[in-house]
Image: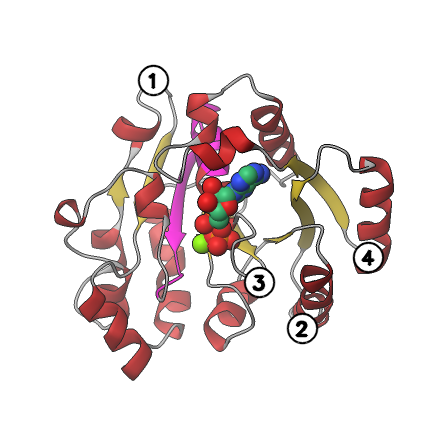
Amino acid sequence: MGSRKIVTVHSYRGGTGKSNLTANLAVCAAEQGKRVAVLDSDLQSPGVHVLFGYREGEIRLTLLDFLWGRAELRETAYDATPRVCPESTGRCYLVPASLTAEAITRVIENGYDIRRLNAHIDQLLTALDLDYLLIDTHPGLNKETLLATAISDVLLIVLRPDEQDYQGTAILKEVAGQLDIPHTFLVVNKVLSRADRDRLRARVQEAFGHEVIGMVPLSEEFAAIESRDLFVRRHPDHEISHTLRGILARWPT
Ligand SMILES: Nc1ncnc2c1ncn2[C@@H]1O[C@H](COP(=O)(O)OP(=O)(O)O)[C@@H](O)[C@H]1O
Ligand SMILES: [Mg+2]
C-alpha cells in the first residue's frame, strides 16, 4: 500500500468549490504523470462527471450500483484520460455518483451502506494502480462523509472567507480531529482580490490550527467556465493553476 494516498476534499457548507477543486487537482496530478481517480461520493448532488464532460448516456454503472451490491467497484471506474488530459503520461479515472433523478430519490429514501466502500477501496487502488484517490464529498457532517474521511491519508478542508464557513469549519475540525487523519490541510477559496492575504492566512491558520496550503482568488474567469470544463485545461498558466499545483506539491508522496 505504501505510497498510495486517499485524499478527501470536504467543506462544512456547499458551494465552496470542492468539486471544481477536486477535479482540477486530479487533472494536475495526472498531467504530472500520476495515476489518479476521483470518486464522487456526493450521492445527493453529484457533479464531477459534469466537469469531466460526461453525459448521462455515457455512464452505465455508478458508485451507487456498487453500494447497492449490483456491481464491483472496479466496474464503476471510467478512464477519463482521453477527455481530460489526453497528452499526459498519467491516468485519470472517475467513479461517478448516481446521476438519475430516480437513483437520487432512492438514495434519499433508502440510504446506502458506505461501509461497503471502505471495505473495497484498497482493491480499487490496487486494480487501477493508483497514486492518489480523491474523494469529493457532500457538504456538512454526515455518517457517510465521516466514514470516508476516517480512511483518508489527507483531509483537505475547503472554506471561503465567510463567517458562516468559519463557524462550520470549527465544528468540522473538532469532529475530524477525533478521526486520527495523518494530514489535515486548509484551502481558502474565493478570496477577494482586495483581501490582505497574509493576514487572512494567519487568521485562518490560527483559528483552525491547520496549515493553509492554498489560497485561491475569487475569479470571474473561473465562474465563467460554469463547471463545463476544467480551469487548469483552459488556463494552464493562470495564477490559480499555479496555486493548484502548489497544493498538490504539499501532499505526501
Ligand atoms: N475561485 C473561484 N472563483 C469563482 N468561482 C468559483 C471559484 N471556485 C469555484 N467557483 C464556482 O463556485 C460554484 C460552486 O463550485 P462547486 O465546485 O460546485 O462547489 P461545491 O462542490 O463545494 O458545492 C461553481 O459555479 C464554480 O464555478
Ligand atoms: Mg460538489
The vertical placement of 145 against 194, above or below, is below
The local secondary structure at tag 1 comes to loop
Q: Which residue is mark 4?
A: 209
The CA span between labels 1 and 2 is 41 Å
Question: Mark 1, mark 3: which one is toward the viewer?
Answer: 3
Q: Quadrant of the C terminus?
A: top right
Q: Say whether marks 4 and 3 touch (CB < 8 Å).
A: no
Please tell me the numbered disc located at residue 175: 2
Dot 1 amino acid type: Glu
Q: Along the line of sight, which residue is nearer the eye, 6 or 56?
A: 56
Q: Which residue is mark 1?
A: 87
The vertical placement of 196 against 211, above or below, is above
Q: Is mark 3 within 8 Å of ligand 1?
A: yes
Residue at 30% across / 22% down in the picture?
A: 86
Question: Mark 3, mark 2: which one is toward the viewer?
Answer: 3
Residue 225 in the image: state x and y as whole percent: 41, 33
Residue 212 in the image: state x and y as whole percent: 74, 45
Q: Is residue 33 magenta?
A: yes
Please tell me the numbered disc located at residue 13: 3
Magenta highlight range: 24-43
The local secondary structure at tag 3 comes to loop
Is 228 positioned to the left or the right of 132 in the image?
left
The CA span between labels 4 and 1 is 39 Å
Residue at 73% across / 67% down in the picture?
A: 167
Residue at 23% across / 53% down in the picture?
A: 76
Dot 4 amino acid type: Gly
Question: Mark 4, mark 3: which one is toward the viewer?
Answer: 3
The local secondary structure at tag 2 comes to helix
Residue 249 occupies quadrant: top right
Q: Is residue 50 magenta?
A: no
Q: Earlier in the sequence, mark 1 or mark 3?
A: 3
